[in-house]
Image (cartoon, rainbow, N blue to C red):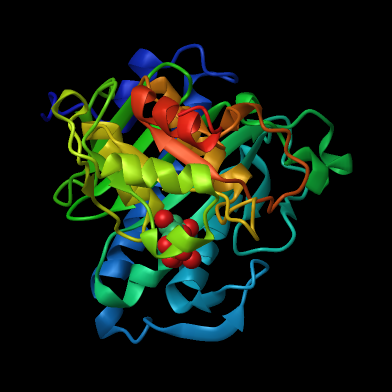
Amino acid sequence: MAQQALTLERFISLNQPTFPGGASVLTGLLSQIGLVGKYLAHDLRRAALLDILGTTGTTNVQGETVKKLDEIANETFVRLLQQNGQVCALASEEMEQPIILPRSGAQGAYMVLFDPLDGSSNTDVNMPLGSIFSIVMKQRPDDVLSESDLVRKGTEQVAAGYLLFGASTMLVFTTGQGVHGFTLDPESGDYLLSHKAITMPARGKVYAANEGNYQKWPCGTQKYFDYLKVKDKATGRPYSGRYSGCLVADVHRILLGGGIYLYPGELDKPEGKLRLLYEANPLAWVVEQAGGRASTGTMRILDVEAKQLHQRVPLIIGSMDDVLEAERHIQGQA
Ligand code: AFP
């Protein structure tokens, strides 16, 4: 339900006085990310008319084919965040190395890690897409900053969230004081508060996963998916499958209505597919702040010791009771 027309900037000034560095800094950072969202929403709406669909013919550090829109999204994030004046370093799924900005001065205390375009398989078929961001603070002087300064535990984030490019464009974020959703008003160009203090049901009725991988999963994981399909009125089973190919879209559905998203570890890829620093950590914080849970199946995502910038991690995320049930099965206790 839309609240009174409270803009992102006004909401932050009223509700985020304790943000490290002050509310005005958070406003600056989130407004810039919101501006990235406006540019990308504009590009996505016209992509099929501008010959910016399809691939670039290159692969990224992940070994994945790079879509033209991946490149455009990454360039937009880099260009706009470099202008921000508060950012001293940037790391992206699409860039092997981080960008350490020339001396950004005292203001430049923030490091932004992002997945510029999540759900790239959806770009050419007009399906939902997202961007994910995680913000941490530098702990060393600018002139010694390096990749290792960006490789931090999820509990060290100071802000995190995502942009969702669906029927509307949304910005959802947390700074540790709840989770709040803003919808872009195409008329005014403002992000207006539409989902204040989002809280998740303890249990949902949907699950999101690529079940084409079923044969690759360990036995405990398979048993959980079998469990979801057994009829049981008390636990609302069988659950309905809802998988869009875009983590942000699937997690957003679950954030608002409950349920569970799983990209589990596989027998030959126990680390799974998703990246810890700019996919799992930011979404884990958002979901925890809404009363949910996010784990690897055996430990809390936000406690995972990060070792590499593009480190992968299994991700089980969603309603508290659903994730706990998945963990029981994955750990062989069910
Ligand atoms: P892409 O951005 O490469 O499409 O990956 C999207 C994603 O990271 C996440 O958004 C999806 O939930 C998941 O991967 C889809 O992966 P599968 O295609 O293996 O199901």
Q: Position of residue 329 (x, y in %)?
A: 47, 34
Percent x, y of residue 253: 25, 42
Rendered location of residue 320, percent (x, y): 38, 23
Of 163 and 26, nearer the camera is 163
The reply to whether residue 83 is visible in this rendering is no
Count of labels in the image = 0
The picture quadrant for ligand 1 comes to bottom left
Image quadrant holding the N terminus, namely top left
319 up-or-down from 307: above or below: above
Q: Name the residue at 30% across, 68% down.
A: 44
- Residue 126, quarter of the rendered image: bottom left
Residue 164 lies, with reference to residue 283, above or below; the image says below
Q: Measuring 30% from the left and 55% from the top, which residue is drawn there? A: 243
- The quadrant of the image that shows the C terminus is top left
Residue in view at x 75 percent, y 50 percent: 100
Whole-percent x, y for residue 54 in the image: 40, 84
In this rendering, the answer to whether 293 lies above or below 53 is above
Residue at the spot 27% in from the left edge and 81% down from the top edge? 48
Residue lying farthest to the top in this orientation? 18
Q: Is residue 39 visible?
A: yes
